[in-house]
Image (spheres, grey):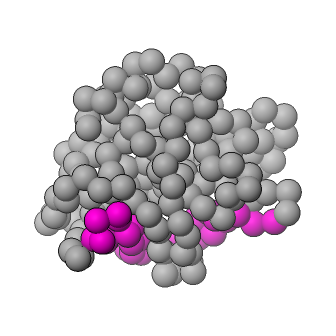
């Protein structure tokens, strides 16, 4: 899975779909996470696609479906009609495998808040549960929640750590600037796998 994910990084030159404005992807290199250090003990799970996400501390429960590449070569995002669902990038590891599983979602829409509207309220230590197709649940602990200018995203930190199973939740944030940019910033949740519930 890692080879495929890095290979995609080589060919991606665009940004995330501008509807969510989630930032540019480049070939990653190794990084050291900041914020709360990840737990030392962790399981490693077999591949299985995510189907639901639950974050009790912010009242988030939503379906997760796969997203691929948009027509311009960027990572796609959930359609506007599925704004209350999250999108797992199919070329990233599945949650629980080594490496960063990437899950994206809208912060809002023309009709109101969307799936990741409260993401910025998460705090280090909060738990994120990802239910997987095989009936297992990957449980992650938030290390940090950070906001970055879209022009200065820490690409290496977001996509490069294959030292352990981890998770990145990504949405928009900051000031609305409109146009093709939308919001000026991205909110990124960095989390590490701490437990696995098996079926």
The quadrant holding residue 48 is: bottom left
Residue displayed at 73% across by 56% down: 81
Q: Position of residue 39 (x, y in %)?
A: 22, 65
Residue displayed at 34% across by 23% down: 7
Q: In this view, does 156 lie above or below 61?
A: above
The quadrant holding residue 11 is: top left
Q: Where is residue 143 in the image (x, y as percent from the top left)?
A: 37, 62
Q: In which quarter of the image is the C terminus?
A: bottom left
Asked if the magenta segment contains residue 75, the reply would be: no
Residue displayed at 22% across by 48% down: 98
Does residue 23 appear in this view? no
In the figure, is residue 109 to the left or right of 132?
Answer: right
Q: Where is residue 49 in the image (x, y as percent from the top left)?
A: 36, 55
Q: In this view, does 167 lie above or below 53?
A: above
Camera-side residue: 116 or 156?
116
Number of marks in the rendered image: 0
Camera-side residue: 186 or 115?
115
Highlighted magenta segment, given as a residue range: 112-139
Asked if the magenta segment contains residue 137, the reply would be: yes
In the figure, is residue 142 to the left or right of 63?
Answer: left
The quadrant holding residue 35 is: bottom left
Does residue 39 appear in this view? yes
Q: Is residue 143 above or below residue 59?
A: above
Q: Is residue 158 above or below residue 197?
A: above
Q: Position of residue 119 (x, y in %)?
A: 58, 65
Q: Quadrant of the N terminus?
A: top left
Residue displayed at 81% across by 66% down: 112
């Amino acid at each position: 899975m890692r080879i495929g994910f890095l290979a995609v990084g080589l060919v991606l030159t665009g940004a995330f779909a501008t509807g969510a404005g989630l930032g540019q992807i480049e070939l990653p290199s190794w990084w050291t996470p900041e914020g709360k250090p990840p737990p030392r003990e962790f399981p490693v799970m077999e591949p299985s696609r995510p189907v639901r996400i639950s974050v009790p501390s912010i009242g988030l429960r939503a379906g997760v479906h796969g997203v691929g590449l948009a027509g311009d070569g960027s990572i796609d995002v959930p359609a506007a009609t599925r704004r209350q669902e999250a999108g797992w990038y199919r070329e990233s590891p599945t949650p629980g495998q080594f490496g960063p599983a990437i899950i994206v979602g809208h912060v809002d829409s023309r009709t109101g808040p969307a799936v990741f509207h409260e993401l910025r309220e998460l705090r280090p230590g909060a738990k994120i549960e990802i239910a997987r197709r095989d009936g297992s649940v990957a449980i992650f602990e938030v290390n940090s929640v950070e906001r970055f200018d879209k022009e200065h995203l820490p690409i290496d930190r977001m996509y490069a750590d294959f030292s352990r199973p981890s998770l990145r939740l990504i949405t928009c944030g900051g000031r609305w600037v409109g146009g093709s940019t939308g919001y000026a910033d991205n909110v990124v949740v960095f989390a590490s796998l701490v437990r696995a519930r098996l079926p």
